[in-house]
Image (cartoon, rainbow, N blue to C red):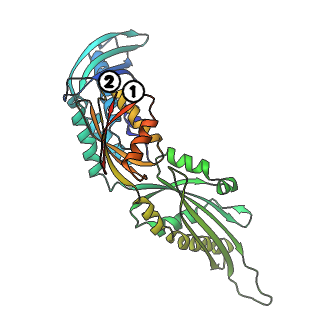
Amino acid sequence: MKKSILCLLTAAVFCAACSGIRIGPKGEGEYVYAESLVPYDENNLKQMKKDGVLAAQRTAVEQVAGVFISSATTVDQAQLVEDKITSKTAGFIRRSHVQKAYRKGDQWFTRIKAMVLVKDIGEIIKQSESDAFAKKTTILVTSREMNGEDISLRQDCKQAIYRALKNQPFALVNGDNLSQNNIEEPTSVIDKARTEGARFVIVANVETNPLVTLAGNTSPFKTYRARANIRTYAANNYALVAEGAQQLSGLDPLPDIAAQKSISAACEAAAKQLAEPVNAAINSAKTFNVTVKDVNTIERLKQIQNIFKDLREIEDFNLVRYANSSAQFEIAANIATPEELAAKIIRKYNVNFTVVTITPSAIVLSFN
């Protein structure tokens, strides 16, 4: 499931905290104020102080790296970037200066001011995402599977959905087992999918029951009939984008196996009906290039990204470049015109933007 690499990077630091960031010399990088806590070691003060500086430098790099993460970055991509960045922290520091360092209980506190090379970090993240196994749209698969009045936890329906859609250009990830309430009102399921980074969520509901045996029938085989209904919702706006339904039977001497066969057959057939409309929904978003000038601080840059995350019309965004206080984004949005997108961005922020230019595919804004 989709997660922010910033969380992964932060977890790699055994104890660190950070404070403010301000813009550095134009085009060079960012001045980052970062702090760390490492175990106090009176037997090796020199190494302890070095460890404190290195931990603070890593925190400084993490702060900058976090703003370059795509909203569609997957866990695998995040791990790849983590390995590249955290193993070369020093390579992203132009210079650093210890502002404060002192013992704090059984730990050593260090505060530094470091110049972090923003461009270099942005390029390595972009390259890592390009090199990663095809960056795909993530779809969360959830289900409620019933054998008569009993809940089945075997996930036969989910496995059938994976088989039916395994060659599609999107990634399926395992979600929760659902209740009847989730089926009738899937809002909470959709909200969770969005939180976990999925663009769509599949909600499958299947029930199988034994068929009544005709009088005089001495066959050793048991027959079950399953009814599957599978819906796909967009996580950004709760819209139903695809639906498949099928009824099929399963035959086997063992009742449980016959039930499993019926569930698998019905769900696989229903899931195949989703492929075309889901792909159409994936490709429905338009691409806009959005530039915001006079950003000046990383904090402001994060505010912009939060706006993009909150706007349900925006499917994905990438920070393409950040230099000279200007941030360039590539945005995929289900929205008709650039004017409408610009208006929604402006309404989401409590300080006015100035619209510099708008073309059919590009928007240029500036902080007032």
Is 100 situated above or below 3? Answer: above
Q: Quadrant of residue 19?
A: top left
| Position of the C terminus by quadrant | top left
Is 65 situated above or below 127? Answer: above
Left or right: residue 313 versus residue 26 is: right
Q: Quadrant of residue 46?
A: top left
Q: Position of residue 29 (x, y in %)?
A: 22, 28
The outermost residue toward the right is: 215
Left or right: residue 203 versus residue 317 is: right
Residue designated by label 2: 55
Is 319 situated above or below 258? Answer: above
Q: Secondary structure at mark 1?
A: loop
Callout 1–callout 2 Cβ contact below 8 Å: yes
Q: Amino acid at mark 2?
A: Ala
Q: Quadrant of residue 214?
A: bottom right
**Dot 2 crowding, Cα within 10 Å, few <14, some 14–19, many 20+:** many
Left or right: residue 171 versus residue 219 is: left
Residue designated by label 1: 14
Q: Amino acid at mark 1?
A: Phe
Q: Residue drawn at (65%, 71%), measured in percent from left and top? A: 227
Q: Position of residue 239 (x, y in %)?
A: 54, 56
Q: Residue drawn at (36%, 44%), measured in percent from left and top? A: 70
Q: Secondary structure at mark 2?
A: helix
**Dot 1 crowding, Cα within 10 Å, few <14, some 14–19, many 20+:** few
Q: Position of residue 88 (x, y in %)?
A: 24, 34
Between residues 101 and 229, which one lies in front from this camera angle? Answer: 229
Work out whether mark 1 precedes mark 2 in sequence or the reverse, and give the earlier one.
1
